[in-house]
Amino acid sequence: MTSTTSTTPATLVVLPADVQDLLFKEAHTAHTYTDEPVTDAQIAAVHELVKNGPTSLNSQPLRGVLVRSDEARARLVAHMAPGNQAKTLKAPLVVVLAADLHFHETLHRVAPHVPDARNLFTDEQVRHDAAVLNAALQIAYFIVGVRAAGLAVGPMSGFDARAVTDEFFPGGRHRALVVANIGRPGPDAFRPRAPRLAFDEVFTSV
Amino acid sequence: MTSTTSTTPATLVVLPADVQDLLFKEAHTAHTYTDEPVTDAQIAAVHELVKNGPTSLNSQPLRGVLVRSDEARARLVAHMAPGNQAKTLKAPLVVVLAADLHFHETLHRVAPHVPDARNLFTDEQVRHDAAVLNAALQIAYFIVGVRAAGLAVGPMSGFDARAVTDEFFPGGRHRALVVANIGRPGPDAFRPRAPRLAFDEVFTSV
């Protein structure tokens, strides 16, 4: 690992510094928001940007519900952890992000290059795990995409996942994974940055 | 959804067009690579860029093994699906990406703002699911970061996950999720883009 000390990391990243800040370095999870609405057009633009992000067999199991009505918002907030309720009530837009556990039914359209792709997922556990893994990848692309649209995001996993799934994805073929608040950051939106693990705590070599 | 037709999506994304292309729009999973090495310094720069990406309670469960030796590469390739073996053998760098299922032991350091965070994960299934979800988010940030370093990536889930876990994360406290080939794209590196789901197939409103 001596090589890491001899080169400035920033020079190895080809992104402009302001973009590095926008997407990652200075981006923070937001806990308050202004009243400025977040439009469907903005979310569609985020989707258009990140839709090509890679998933296994191009499976794209992510599904989202934009919680627009006051009635739906109230149903959601009731299932959030206490510490997440106030901000989820106030955010300009809240999106429930879930995995489609029956994504194999769409593979003939999205993975035409693998004619028998559907048959790789007859085992329910294998299918579930692939759905969750790939939907989570897409949730991260979506988070980066929201920031690329100049918006702040507050992703949360503190909620009753079974209840939220039943409320917003009835039918038993989805699993809610993340609820994301989205908007322009408001007053005192950000908490101090918590510590990050060092490179050599995350990566080893063999 | 009429609003999506009245505004050009590109104008709602504040990223420069060339950065949109680099990270998402023109980025493709690579299937061949040049011989140019990928250094530890490059991967450290990627880590430095994306380490602030959000995870639940700042848990950061991602762990990676950089497969550097020929001997380790051979052990890995033996557990890849047949269609992934040749490219995994030839890529300049291969990284095994896994979830640390015991991430709760690190929470006192990374989530000092939640003194009892560890106690939220005494249930093994809850902890496992949180580890996989959050490691998958970090894998996606890592994929975006590799592209931000001007490199191509070929993430794969077609491998014997149990065998790869045992080989590269012995001890039973991890779960291998993705194996990623990394390098400069070589000849015929990219396949034609497979179809993506439309916005209204992924998102609905309530």
Image (cartoon, coloured by chain):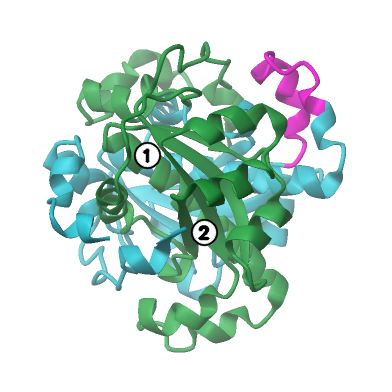
Chain colours: A green, B cyan
Q: Amino acid at mark 2?
A: Asn
Q: Return the residue at label 2.
A: A134
Please state the extent of the stretch shown in magenta in the rendering.
B101-118
Depth check: give the residue in front, A130 or A40: A40
Q: Earlier in the sequence, mark 1 or mark 2?
A: 2
| Residue drawn at the location 42% of the way across and 62% of the way down | B204
Between B83 and B90, the one lying in front of the other is: B83
Q: Is residue B65 magenta?
A: no
SS for tag 2?
helix
Q: CA distance from mark 1 to mark 2?
A: 16 Å
Residue A21 image point, x, y percent: 31, 22
Name the residue: 38% across, 23% down: A185
Instruction: Point out residue B100 in the picture as x, y percentages from the top left corner.
Output: 70, 39
Chain containing mark 2: A
Q: Foreground mark, 1 or 2?
A: 1
Label 2: how many Cα within 10 Å (few below 14, some 14–19, many 20+): many
User: For mark 1, what is the residue?
Assistant: A144
Query: Which amino acid type is marked by label 1?
Result: Val
Q: Is residue A106 left or right of residue B62?
A: left
Q: Quadrant of the N terminus of chain B?
A: bottom left
Determine contact: label 1, label 2, CB under 8 Å. no
> Which SS class for mark 1?
helix
